[in-house]
Image: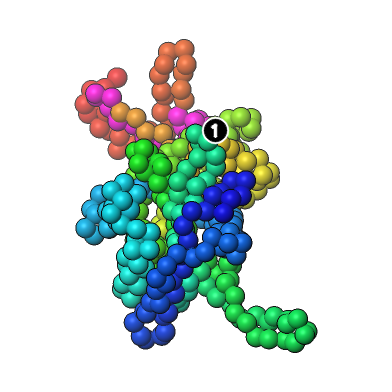
Amino acid sequence: MRTAERHLTHLIVHTLTKDAGAPARLVLRDAPCALDGAALRLVERLCGQYESRAAKGVGRFEEDEEAFPLARWLRAHVIDDTLDFVALSHQFAERVRAIADEEELEDGGHLVMARIREGAGDGSADCLWAALLGEAEGVSISGALELRDCSHVDFAALHAAGRIDLTGWRRGDERYLGFLRGRGKGGAWFKRVLGCSDVMVALQETKKLVATLDRFVDTEGLAPATRDAVLERAHDYLDTLGEAGAPVVFEELAREVFPEQPARLDALLRAEETKIAPGFVPNRRAIRPLVRFSASAENWKLEFERSGLHSGAVHYDRATVTLVLSGVPDYLKRMLEEDGAD
């Protein structure tokens, strides 16, 4: 099926049943779903729900394909053409079932797998989507205006989802795998199903975020004290997220850091030219430059708080390219005097 942006080529649905205290069970479909109007609506709603979520992680496949076999299965399906779509979906569903038991998940749902061509022309991407959707009870009205109980797919209960840019993967891109995050177990178990590694991505994205926040306070023309307060709030908030293992959500970060006009910061964080991927867990070491400077040379190493530049504790002389430190503690003075320093 075609829309202006998506061309659905493969779709299949399985069911994962998870009762309390019992192992998960699978009901597997043996053939792909028909690519009719209902299939297209399902995919459009799924993609739309995924894209509307702010907390998403990005990364690439883990290198260990024995422990994380999805990359190996995809190679057989996409490149070697030795594994058809239905067989691929069965292997993936079995992995979901096994990890659902290991992680002691409480809820099951409908496991959807779809292959979609996104975009058009040279910029299009061949993508594989996988998601676990919940179910809700409802009421329908028959042609005779009789009320009937019915159940339907609950897109709001999107328990887990992932998107693999197969084109980017084959091209060797740095990041081609995305997944929904959540607090607690959240999407962490599905990240394991996908075999996604995002450790280095989190470090890189944190560094880009720090640079963007630094650029923001400069372009806003804030007073020194206000500038320091914004960066300190950013540091404290991101440090809390990092300690809890929670992902960055741009809108929430903007409200915490710049409550006066959060939309301005939010727009910069989301800007295409900024190139910060949403949904990563902040690297706590990488956020230190928000509140302190550190540098070293052959004979010295120095670290001080940014606020010291405005309090007078640290003074930088542009003309002589020197730093002057005030309020030297007594123990350091004694050490310097004993060593004969001028």
Left or right: residue 81 compared with residue 167: left
Which of the image's four quarters has the C terminus? Answer: top left
- Residue located farthest toward the right when viewing the structure as drawn: 145
Residue in front for this viewpoint, 285 or 47: 47
Residue 193 seen in the current view: no
Residue at 65 percent of width and 46 percent of height: 262
- Whether 188 is drawn above or below 331: the answer is below
Left or right: residue 50 compared with residue 78: right
Which segment is the magenta one?
A: 297-314
Left or right: residue 188 compared with residue 212: left
Circle 1 Cα neighbour tier, 10 Å, few/some/many (<14 / 14–19 / ≥20) = few
Identify which amino acid the numbered label 1 is placed on. Answer: Glu
Residue at 65 percent of width and 80 percent of height: 138
- The question of residue 313 being in magenta is answered with yes
Residue at 42 percent of width and 51 percent of height: 164
Residue 303 seen in the current view: yes
Report the residue marked by disc 1. Answer: 273
